[in-house]
Amino acid sequence: MGNTSFVASNTGVGNMARIDGSGATESAIEAFFGADISDSYLGSVGSAIMTTLGLNAGDMLSFDYFFQATDYMPYNDFAVYMGTDGQMDLLSNIAAVGDYGNSGWQTVEVEITVSGVYDIGFAAINATDAVYVPQLYVDNLVIA
Ligand SMILES: [Ca+2]
Ligand SMILES: [Ca+2]
């Protein structure tokens, strides 16, 4: 929802998701996930994607992400994700990557301990205002 698209993967294989920190209100994104995003992040507008996966205990879920800031502190634009705990956890923000900085490619791995159906999703969100929009790229969502 909001402004998302698929662009060529950084690995050169297939596509990856590009999520732009514009297009939808944070409250609409919270409704989309059915989960709260901490008000302490001061989110304003952004975009989100979500997928639903059947996972088995012992599976290893992994994904790569790249957070690109175009803003500077104190405009602490950020990215969050919904992992297997059903909550919106912080992936990155400008406080972490620096003014106009980026996270580089990072890999997150989650071991599944309880078999079930999980919503997995990602959002890039502007903080405080709606300008100098952050981007989040997500690639290589893998179940192994
Ligand atoms: Ca909230
Ligand atoms: Ca901004």
Image (cartoon, rainbow, N blue to C red):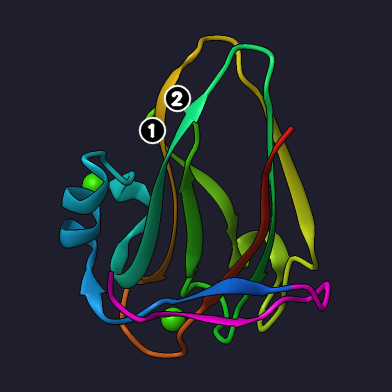
Q: At 39% from the left edge and 60% from the top edge, which residue is drawn?
A: 49
Residue 30 in the image: state x and y as whole percent.
23, 50
CA separation, marks 1 and 2? Answer: 5 Å
The quarter of the picture where residue 118 lies is: top left
The vertical placement of 110 against 29, above or below, is: above
Helix, strand or loop at label 1? It is loop
**Ligand 1 near label 2 (Cβ, under 8 Å)?**
no
The three-letter amino acid code for the residue at tag 2 is Asp
Query: Magenta stretch containing residue 5, yes or no?
Result: yes
Specify few, some or many for label 1: CA neighbours under 10 Å numbering under 14, 14-19, or 20 or more: some
Q: What residue range appears in magenta? A: 1-13
Which residue does the numbered mark 1 point to in the structure image?
87
The quarter of the picture where residue 111 lies is: top right
Specify few, some or many for label 2: CA neighbours under 10 Å numbering under 14, 14-19, or 20 or more: few
Q: At 16% from the left edge and 60% from the top edge, which residue is drawn?
A: 28
The vertical placement of 41 against 67, above or below, is: above
Q: Quadrant of the N terminus?
A: bottom left
The quarter of the picture where residue 8 lies is: bottom right
Q: At 52% from the left edge and 46% from the top edge, which residue is drawn?
A: 90
Q: At 37% from the left edge and 29% from the top edge, which residue is drawn?
A: 86
Q: Quadrant of the C terminus?
A: top right
